Image: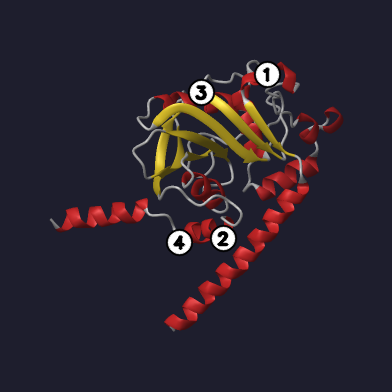
């Protein structure tokens, strides 16, 4: 009986959003619609890949029995701050299932991280897994910036019928010129990226960054997908300033709490 109670309490705590996610979600609501749903968090979901490995994801879901669309975020940068509140908290409370997934070889996901190489196949495997989930209603969108934008283009190479919208922010469909300017590998770019991304290296030799499209116009079926791109730096700047203020407020609150505890 005692073990059952402990398991229930553990499950209840796991389903609750972390404190920092609740805080930053509240801070980011200014100017946005009021939340429509409470949010539940399911951590550590294992999504099978064709090669037998699994990729880890967290699902933020609205507490409702109604069918809701799904927002897929595939990232090599971890499933924590700022993606947990910026995508997970804010979108789930508006009625989206948000699947925050760590790409191959990152964030506990299996396999080896080779940027750009496996994103198309892994994204398709993720969508195939989604089709078997009881909460998936057949309506899918993607969102993200930089490499998170590339993972969207990789899926759009052969867009599944469930894909209804893409929100690509400050990204590109072809990083070849970034990594291999003039056809030669740029060592400084590789070094900076490895330092920033925890040691992940750019592909070498024949496994160079593939372009899913080699020109956006070649993407089959893209005309039926609603595509949004972030073209206004001023919007991004305003959000960054708001985030900085929120971080300062969070730090001050945490410091005051520690002082009171002492």
Task: State which quadrant residue 212 falls in.
Answer: top right
Position of 250 relative to 128 (above/below): below
- Return the residue nearer the eye: 99 or 122: 99
- Return the residue nearer the eye: 58 or 88: 88
Single out the mark in the foreground, 4 or 3.
3
Q: Calculate the distance from the C-alpha at mark 2 to the C-alpha at mark 3.
A: 32 Å
Residue reaching furthest to the right: 182
Residue at the disc numbered 2: 27
Along the polypeptide, which appears first: circle 1 or circle 2? 2
- Residue 96 x %, y %: 47, 39
Circle 4/circle 3 CB separation < 8 Å? no
In the image, is 16 to the left or to the right of 162?
A: left
Circle 2/circle 3 CB separation < 8 Å? no
Residue at the disc numbered 1: 219
- Colour basis: secondary structure
Residue at the disc numbered 3: 162
Along the polypeptide, which appears first: circle 2 or circle 3? 2
- Residue 209 x %, y %: 70, 28
- Secondary structure of the residue carrying numbered label 2: helix
């Amino acid at each position: 009986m005692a073990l059952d109670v402990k398991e229930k309490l553990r499950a209840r705590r796991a389903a609750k959003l972390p404190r920092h996610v609740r805080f930053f979600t509240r801070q980011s609501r200014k100017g946005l619609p009021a939340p429509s749903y409470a949010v539940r968090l399911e951590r550590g979901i294992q999504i099978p890949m064709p090669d037998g490995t699994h990729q880890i994801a967290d699902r933020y879901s609205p507490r409702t029995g109604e069918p809701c669309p799904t927002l897929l975020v595939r990232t090599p940068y971890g499933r924590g701050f700022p993606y947990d509140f910026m995508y997970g908290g804010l979108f789930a409370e508006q009625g989206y299932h948000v699947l925050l997934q760590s790409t191959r070889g990152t964030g506990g996901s299996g396999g080896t991280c080779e940027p750009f190489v496996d994103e198309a196949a892994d994204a398709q495997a993720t969508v195939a897994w989604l089709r078997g989930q009881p909460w998936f209603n057949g309506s899918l969108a993607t969102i993200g910036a930089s490499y998170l934008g590339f993972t969207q283009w990789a899926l759009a190479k052969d867009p599944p019928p469930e894909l209804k919208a893409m929100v690509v922010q400050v990204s590109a469909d072809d990083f070849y010129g970034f990594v291999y300017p003039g056809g030669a590998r740029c060592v400084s770019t590789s070094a900076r990226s490895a330092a920033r991304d925890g040691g992940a290296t750019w592909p070498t030799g024949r496994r160079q960054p593939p372009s899913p499209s080699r020109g956006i116009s070649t993407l089959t079926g893209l005309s039926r997908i609603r595509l949004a791109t972030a073209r206004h730096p001023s919007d991004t700047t305003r959000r960054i300033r708001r985030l900085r203020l929120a971080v300062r407020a969070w730090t001050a609150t945490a410091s005051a709490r520690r002082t009171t505890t002492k």
